Image (spheres, grey):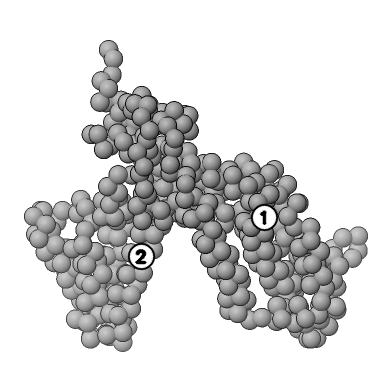
């Protein structure tokens, strides 16, 4: 018995929406909602955190029995707020919310914060609870809404598949940089600056290189992806959608020129994030390789006595975290070496990013694969959007 066309289309639409999520572009899903598709999906986690926050009623300066009563009272207060929110939603009093909207989010943020105020007037604890819950909701929204986990997984898989091309690009793009950075590596000033940086400053300096690289990529995104959403014909769309769930939807459209469907602001942000993550995974891979090279080079070529002289400390004061013995010779891994190697790796990652995005011969090889995958996703979106509009 043949399957009705409507059932085939419904299954294909659901498979296509899962395909979007797996590739880190959930905002391609029509009517993608934060309440329905983001916070509702993590409702069990939010519920557990909400109930655990009854501990905010505790005060460790009180006697144990008083804290037990406060915890019971806090739990009762949170449960009462839960019931009230359900009543406002016309749901059974103890029902778990089937959708997390504004009311539920306000209750999640403010109700636990009321506990420290009611039980002991702990204003600082209340403010900290509000800030923590807002931060948690923001992190959940960004990670879940934009599919950062599947997006990063896709980026890692993509780099693994393109490893040969990436190594070839690295060999072509970095010879001069490697010579220059190696020269910096054996300079006393580099060790005095990077080798003695406190941990907080070292992290801040590394993040500065990352931030500059991210801003540079963002500035280049309009040029790279601005025209990808426009297709000359449905024939082109069908070819790009081959092998995807949307392939089953393609026969429902005619051969007319696809409509010009401009990306929404959230879709544009989602697409940009995909390119940024895919680019970032490649840059991180390159930076790790360079950092590993300098760690190995430093262990083999720079003895601890020289490191101590360059850094300006007594050899006994160096932070040695590992020793390797080969043929009777001892090679030391120090914190100072890791900091210098990490500093130069971060700088090299920034240089690599700028080089491959400004030189056309490198840029095409670096971005062609990413943009091709993105163009395919946009073709799937074109077919999916047309069908969803017709339904």
Above or below, 224 against 381 in this view is below
Q: Earlier in the sequence, mark 1 or mark 2?
A: 2
Q: Is residue 305 left or right of residue 65?
A: right
Residue at screen point 64% across, 61% down: 354
SS state under label 2: helix
SS state under label 1: loop
Category of crowding for the residue at label 1, using alpha-carbon neighbours closer than 10 angstroms: few (below 14), some (14–19), many (at least 20): few
Category of crowding for the residue at label 2, using alpha-carbon neighbours closer than 10 angstroms: few (below 14), some (14–19), many (at least 20): few
Q: Position of residue 202 (x, y in %)?
A: 62, 76
Residue at screen point 38% across, 33% down: 257
From the image, tell me which residue sits under label 2.
138
Dot in front, 1 or 2: 1
Residue at screen point 53% across, 41% down: 372
User: Label 1 vs label 2: CA separation?
Assistant: 37 Å
Q: Position of residue 322 (x, y in %)?
A: 75, 68
Q: Can residue 83 be spotted in the picture?
A: no
Question: Image quarter for residue 49?
Answer: bottom left
Q: Position of residue 6 (x, y in %)?
A: 25, 26
The quadrant of the image that shows the C terminus is top left
The quadrant of the image that shows the N terminus is top left
Question: Image quarter for residue 335?
Answer: bottom right
Residue at screen point 79% across, 61% down: 176
From the image, tell me which residue sits under label 1.
359
């Amino acid at each position: 018995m043949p399957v009705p066309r409507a059932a085939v289309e419904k299954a294909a639409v659901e498979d296509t929406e899962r395909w979007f999520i797996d590739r880190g572009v959930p905002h391609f899903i029509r009517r993608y909602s934060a309440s329905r598709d983001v916070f509702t999906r993590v409702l069990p986690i939010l519920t557990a955190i909400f109930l655990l926050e009854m501990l905010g009623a505790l005060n460790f300066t009180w006697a144990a029995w008083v804290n037990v009563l406060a915890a019971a009272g806090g739990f009762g207060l949170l449960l009462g707020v839960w019931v009230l929110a359900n009543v406002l939603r016309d749901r059974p009093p103890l029902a778990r919310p089937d959708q997390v909207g504004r009311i539920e989010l306000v209750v999640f943020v403010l109700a636990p914060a009321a506990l420290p105020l009611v039980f002991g007037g702990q204003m600082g604890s209340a403010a900290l609870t509000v800030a923590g819950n807002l931060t948690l909701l923001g992190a959940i929204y960004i990670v879940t809404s934009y599919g950062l986990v599947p997006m990063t997984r896709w980026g890692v898989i993509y780099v693994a598949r393109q490893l040969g091309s990436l190594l070839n690009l690295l060999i072509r793009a970095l010879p001069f940089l490697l010579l220059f950075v190696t020269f910096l590596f054996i300079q006393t000033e580099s060790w005095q600056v990077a080798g003695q940086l406190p941990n907080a400053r070292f992290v801040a300096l590394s993040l500065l290189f990352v931030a500059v690289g991210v801003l540079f990529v963002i500035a280049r995104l309009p040029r790279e992806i601005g025209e990808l959403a426009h297709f000359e014909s449905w024939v082109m769309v069908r070819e790009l959608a081959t092998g995807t769930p949307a392939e089953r939807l393609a026969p429902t459209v005619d051969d007319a020129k696809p409509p010009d469907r401009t990306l929404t602001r959230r879709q544009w942000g989602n697409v940009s994030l995909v390119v940024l993550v895919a680019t970032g995974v490649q840059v991180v891979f390159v930076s790790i390789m360079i950092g590993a090279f300098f760690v190995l080079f430093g262990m083999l070529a720079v003895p601890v006595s020289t490191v101590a002289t360059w850094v300006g400390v007594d050899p006994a004061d160096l932070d040695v975290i590992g020793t390797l013995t080969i043929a009777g010779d001892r090679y030391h891994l120090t914190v100072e070496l890791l900091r210098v190697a990490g500093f130069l790796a971060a700088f090299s990652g920034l240089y690599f990013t700028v080089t491959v995005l400004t030189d056309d011969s490198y840029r095409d090889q670096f971005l062609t694969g990413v943009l091709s995958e993105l163009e395919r996703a946009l073709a799937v979106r074109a077919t999916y959007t047309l069908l969803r509009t017709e339904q």
